[in-house]
Image (cartoon, helix red, strand yellow):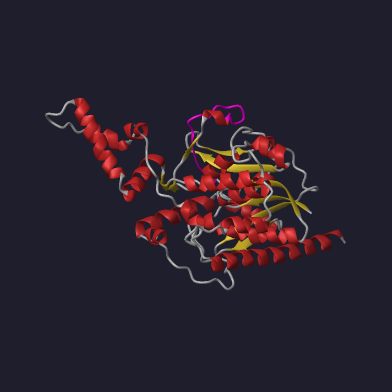
Amino acid sequence: MNFDLAFEGGGAKGAVFLGAIAELERRGHTMRRLVGTSAGALVAAMVAAGYSARELHDALGERLVDGSSRMTTFLDVPADFTDVELDRSSLQRLFDRVDIPFLSESTERRFERALARGFLGIGAFRMLFSLLEKGGVFAGDSLHAWLCERLEARHRGLARAGFAELSRITGRDLSITVSDTTGEEMLVLNARTAPAFPVAWAVRASMSMPLVFQEVVWQRPWGTYRGRDLTGHVLVDGGVLSNFPFHLLTSDLDEVRAIMGPQDPAAAPNLGLLIDERMPVPGQPPVGASAIDRVFELPALRRMTRLMETMLNAHDRAVIQASMANGEICRLPAQGYGSLEFGMTDARRAALVDAGRAATAVYLDARFARHERATK
């Protein structure tokens, strides 16, 4: 059967999707339209590029020379900031309020620049500066570089390709959601709405969890959105407005159809892959807290991350409840796994993937059994 798939956001927990895809492949099912947010956007883009579940598993399991997971580099401390960024920063505005006696304006500016560069030589200060000026403590450059490598390895030129080019090369219909904080709206990026927008940057923007990853700013060469010039608009995690964009597949509103194209449920029924943190993962090995994990266990940051997860999930509850009643959503277990657990061990990832595969098998058996009873 050919499915239209929607992938929920969930950070590192998105590894559970590999099990779901593996089970779909094992049964000979294929995928037509792919819709994703955040980690779901990354998986959807990789599947659209032609990656199988096995290849996805190998890619996400890539190891560095020292044996650590390459995914740990996704939480990368910003390397540096340009003079222009410094001049436009809150730090410079603070300096401008202070007048140092007996120094000329040019000398004072050189002193301020040297002082700022001295502070930025400290990793913790760069993270704080990044949070205040770009909305997140981590740069996200490593994540973008990794995705570009993977897309390029599948098809030459795909690392820089826009949605229209990806559709031409692969024949897949990919949609990725992002939140436009400048225009205060959700954007659905695909070959119809933003044909020139680079797929790799769309994924990076969709994964820009506020407070965690730096925002992405729409660049003029990326073209327009439905004919509108959004150059300079700030883009963050699509999950801020819809962490599970399943409604893009199910809605019959004219506005949605204009974005997603005509529906044909008979040709490709809908399937939503939803991460459920309440469902236990059998055989889950214990987690070892990394330095990053310990930072995010600080009470203040723990409150912020809980707030973010509440924001990411609240909007979609009504859609989820209705679609659960229709039997179109497969819940995938992820209890005990963290959104930022990019450094999970091979054993923990294997347990999560196996749980995703088993949950999908149970779901598909029940779905097709209901279909058989309904057609008798």
Q: Is residue 83 above or below residue 126?
A: above
* Residue 210 vs residue 219, the one in the foreground: 219
Predominant SS of the magenta segment: loop
Left or right: where 166 falls relative to 179 = right
Magenta stretch bounds:
223-238
| Residue 63 visible (yes or no) | yes
Left or right: where 275 falls relative to 124 = right
Q: Is residue 257 magenta?
A: no
The location of residue 77, given as percent across then percent down, is 40, 49
Query: Where is the C terminus found, in terms of image quarters?
Result: bottom right
| Residue 255 visible (yes or no) | no
The location of residue 342, given as percent across then percent down, is 50, 58
Left or right: where 93 falls relative to 268 = left
Residue at image position (52%, 72%) is: 285
Q: Quadrant of residue 254?
A: top right
The location of residue 296, given as percent across then percent down, is 40, 58
Residue at image position (38%, 55%) is: 301
Q: Residue furthest bottom?
A: 283
* Residue 194 vs residue 186, the one in the foreground: 194
Q: Residue furthest right?
A: 376
Left or right: where 137 falls relative to 29 = left
Q: Is residue 41 above or below residue 352?
A: above
Q: Residue furthest front?
A: 65
The location of residue 266, given as percent across then percent down, is 80, 48
Query: Where is the N terminus found, in terms of image quarters?
Result: bottom right
